[in-house]
Image: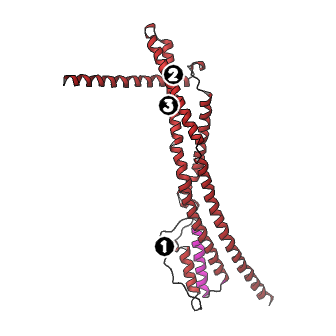
Amino acid sequence: MEGWNKISSGLAGLNLGQSANKLAKGFQSSVQATKERLGQIAPDEITELPQEYKDLEARVDALRAAHLALLKITKVYESETYDYPNQIQESLTELGTTIGHGITNFAAANLKGTALPAPEPAQPNAPQHKTLPHALGRAATNAATAIQTSSGTGDDKLGKALQTYAGAWEKVADARVEQDATIRERFLQPWQTTLSTSINVAMKARQAVRVSRLELDAAKQTLKNASQAKQEAARLEVENAEDDLVQKTEVAITLMKTVLENPEPLKNLNELAKAQLMFYASAAEALSSAQGEIEEFSVAAEGEYRKTRDH
C-alpha cells in the first residue's frame, strides 16, 4: 500500500507539474499577444509564417465568408412563410379551404343537372400552408365560389377564369413546397455541414498555429532575457516550440487544402439552382396555360360586351 501511495503521489505531482507548465505557457502567450497588439514587440521579432500558409488562410477566409453570405439569405427556405404577406388576415374559414378542395366543390356545384358525372364535394385537409402561392390559390378559389353562388349558373366567364387561375396556383403551390424541401435537404443541410465541420476544423487548426507561434515568440523573449544559469533550459524551450509550430503549421496547411479542394460546395450550389429552376419552370408552365384560357374568356366577354353596345 505504501508503494502505491508513493506512485499516486508521484503521478499527482507529475500532472500538477504539467498543468502548471501549461498555465505558464498560456500566460506567456497572452502577454506576448498583448505586447504585439500594443506594438511593444519589434516586427522582426515576430516569427513569420510560410507564404503558402498565409495564402491558404486568405482563401479559406474567402470560402467561409462565401458560405456565410449565401446562408444568411437562403436560410429563409427553412420557413415556408418567407413570402407570405403579413397584412393577410385570412379567416379560419378561408384557411380551411384548400385550393383543390375549392375547385372540386366548384365543379360539383356547376355540373349538377348536366350529363357529366359530378364529383362528390371534398372536405378540406389541414393544416394549410402559408405561402403566397397558397394564399393566391385560396383567394381565387373563394372568389370563384362567390361568383358562381351569386350567378346561380356555371356559365359565368369570370367565375370560370378565377377557377382556372386558382388551378394554376395550386400547381405553383405544390411546386413551391417541393422546391423548399429540396433546397433544405440538398443545399442548406450540406452547406451548413461544410461550414460547421471541415471549415471549422481548418479554423481550429489555424488557431492552434497562432497559439504555437505566440508560445515560440514568448519563449524567444524568455531566452533573450534569461540569466546565464537559465540559458540552456530557455534554449531547449525555443527548440521545442519551433518543432511544435512546424508540426501544427503542416497540419493546418493540409486541412486548409482539403477544405479548398472539396467539390461539395459546388455540388450544393448546383442543387440550389436546379431546385429553383424546376420551381420557376413549373410555375411558368402552369401560369402560361392558365393565362391562355383566361385570355380566351376575356376576348369572348369583350366581344359579347361590344355586341350589346352595338344594338
- Specify whether residue 123 is painted magenta: no
Give whichever of discs 2 and 3 has the lower sequence position: 3
Relative horizontal placement of residue 133, taking residue 302 as reference (left or right)? left
On the rendered structure, is 188 left or right of 306? Answer: left
Q: Which mark is residue 208?
A: 3
Q: Nearer the viewer, mark 1 or mark 2?
A: 2
Along the horizontal axis of the image, is 43 left or right of 5? right
Q: Tell whether label 2 touches label 1 (CB within 8 Å).
A: no
Return the x and y of residue 301 as percentages of the image width and height.
73, 82
Q: Amino acid at mark 1?
A: Asn
First reached walking from the N terminus: tag 3 or tag 1: 1
Q: Quadrant of the C terminus?
A: bottom right
First along the sequence among labels 1 and 2: 1
When the figure is inspected, residue 235 is found, relative to residue 268, above or below; the finding is above
Amino acid of disc 2: Glu
Q: Residue at x 19, y 25 (%)?
A: 1
Type of the residue with mark 3: Ala
**Front-lying residue, 186 or 16:** 186
Residue depicted at 61% across the width and 59% down the height: 275
Viewer-proximal residue among 161 and 306: 161
* Number of residues whose C-alpha sits closer than 10 Å to that of mark 3, classed few (under 14), some (14–19) or many (20 or more): some
Q: Which residue is mark 1?
A: 125
Kindly report which numbered mark, 2 or 3, lies closer to the viewer in this rendering. 2
Circle 1 SS class: loop
Q: Secondary structure at mark 2?
A: helix
- Which callout, 3 or 1, points to the residue nearer the camera? 3
Looking at the rendered structure, which numbered label has been put on residue 242? Answer: 2
Q: In the image, is residue 139 part of the stretch drawn in magenta?
A: yes
Q: Nearer the viewer, residue 73 or 57?
A: 57
What percent of the width, then of the height, locates residue 13? Answer: 31, 22
Q: Residues within 10 Å of mark 2 (few under 14, many from 20)?
A: some
